[in-house]
Image: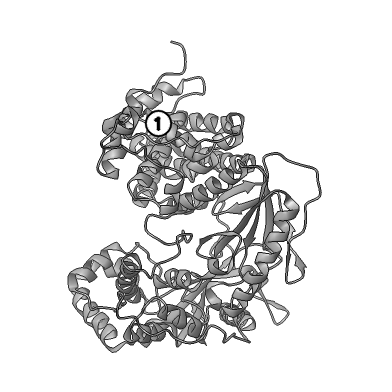
Amino acid sequence: MLRNKVMKEIRQAKANFFINIIGEAKGNSKLIWENLKKLTGKDHSNTAKRLEILVNNNLTQDAVEIAIAFNSYFIDSVKVLTQNPSTGLLGSVLVNDAQPVFIIREVSESKVNKVISSLKNSKSKDVFGLDSTFLKNYKESLIGPITKVTNTSIGLGVFPRVWKSAIITAIFKSGDPADVSNYRPISILPVVSKVVEKCVAEQLISHLNNSPFTLHSMQFGFRAKHSTETANCFLLENVKSKMDKGGVVGAVLLDLRKAFDTVNHEILITKLSKFNFSPDALRWMKSYLEGRTQCVRVSNELSPTLSYDVGVPQGSILGPLLFSLYINDLPSVCTGSEVQMYADDTVIYVHAKSKQQAAQELTTVMVQVTKWLSDSCLHLNVKKTVCMFFTKRATDATEPDVYVSGEKLQVVSDFKYLGIILDSNLSFKKHVKKVIQITKFNLANFRFIRNCLTTEVARLYFKSMILPHLTYCLTSWTQACHTTLKPIQSVYKQALKVLDRKPNSHHHCYILRKHELLSWENLVQYTDACLVFQILNGLAPPPLSTFVKQKIQTYGSRSTRSAMRGDCIVPLRKSTFSKSAFSVRASHVWNTLPSDTHNCTTYHTFTKCMKTWLKVNQICEHNP
């Protein structure tokens, strides 16, 4: 009796432990994963193992020595790249008063309140020992002072010096853990500075969206209505539509060395002036950039601070936006080719009759790109910049060479772009294999703890640790053939059975009904239809509307029923390969939906209607 009681108490304690971990994470897969790594003994972080770094040819575990070594390396590695800055792009442009001028305006307390509430929860301490959680908990007392300091900064055109100090944490990448060059810096800026940054960033985004001075349409990074999914989707659409006409598509995937860290401040200010910034706004931006310092923290020990005078601040809110403006004119030098950017992830590609012709054209384009990079004080990492030729079928022919500044680029058969492994035949076999590998690992952890979880917490784990891996950029890689995708369906069904604690022999249709979930096929259709709705209603990047269009109702003459229903035009493609494109497949899905679903006025309403319709029409796959 006593033994049974003890075992019951142990099981209950274990269940409560897992429930607390997953419940407190509130769907944050990063937090869940960090805790699970500790529980399963897979935590390889610096806290789990004492750091040992090579300093002056001697291994040391002294935290202060290591922190100093890291700080010196992070600063010096950028200085090497920025020793001889170009002056070819300097010279501000006069303000055009006939067009909207960007002026940084003062903010209200209600605005500051909203910005503080929108900050991500974090317990990472800045140089003052503050974090965003503290700011949120005591915002009622802090709103007034923060608003006053923010408006004083805007009025004077000066960014407070005390907000320019960053604490750096060194994160191991790969290779020899004793080598400082195998670590990357993660910056923690003063949390209050992010409130000011967000206020200014929102005003700047509004200026860019409501004036002729806007970001290039091929910039998909860090913009509202843009994402890695829409970036991948557009790239694949464009490549497949070109390949449908015959020939090949050759692409160069640029890799820039420390792109954000090497931004030249003078050149950036010059480029910002071309977006019609007022003199006061330029003065504030210059103050924001200059005079910054950083120190490195290792095991609660801090290195002495060092100053730096290049780059946009890492970990900042304004940094990615300023970098996007910095490289905004890159497409202007890529004549005869197409460019797609996601911050510093840039693809330059051409359509040609043969690989040889594509290689020649890319070599010519890269001459202009190299000059532009030099003028902009950015540095191409030629060893990591690669070339790939997209073709419908694999060939054994020798790949032609593409050159950059006399150096030959590596030609690859596959490349990871924004989280998706693209291969030269767009079969997505390697990507599907990777998704299955990650999902099965998380599924093994799910099995390990499932009996300790309530149904509600198990659903939370399923939606935060399984589904995100299966649905990331789903509109892109599900263009693979049925045979390639079949293992994914199998893994999805296994996850459903673990969720409901059922054996493999149990059919998943019962689980779908019980938990009101979509089958794999319907999940793909749902994702496709959602993106189509966004494209048709101006909630997605405008370039995608080139491929997804609604039939037009003609007034004064007869309109077809499909046009009146709001159906899409299904693009005409010649080959089976091109018919697998998102625009073709998703248009067919859209045209099967009822007209009242087409006519939803908001995205939220559409998603609810779409899920309901799919669940009602979900057919059981097995025979009773």
Q: Amino acid at mark 1?
A: Asn
Where in the figure is residue 246, as x and y percent of width and height?
65, 42
Can you say whether 141 is above or below 149 in the image?
Answer: above
What residue did someone put label 1 on? 4
In the rendered view, does 441 fall on the left or right side of 187? right
Among the 4 quarters of the image, the one containing residue 69: bottom right
In the rendered view, does 92 fall on the left or right side of 170? left
Foreground pick, 340 / 166: 340
Task: Look at 40% across and 72% down and name the residue there.
Answer: 318
Where in the figure is residue 479, as x and y percent of width and height?
55, 37
Q: How many marks?
A: 1
Where in the figure is residue 444, as x and y percent of width and height?
54, 38
Give the crowd class for mark 1: few <14, some 14-19, many >=20 residues within 10 Å.
Answer: few
| Quadrant location, the C terminus | top left
Where in the figure is residue 175, as x and y percent of width and height?
68, 63
* SS for dot 1: helix
Residue 300 showing in the rendered view: no
Can you say whether 82 is above or below 341 in the image?
Answer: below
Residue 449 showing in the rendered view: yes
Task: Look at 60% across and 48% down and name the residue there.
Answer: 421
Can you say whether 606 is above or below 140 in the image?
Answer: above
Foreground pick, 506 / 103: 103
Foreground pick, 64 / 465: 465
| Quadrant location, the N terminus | top left
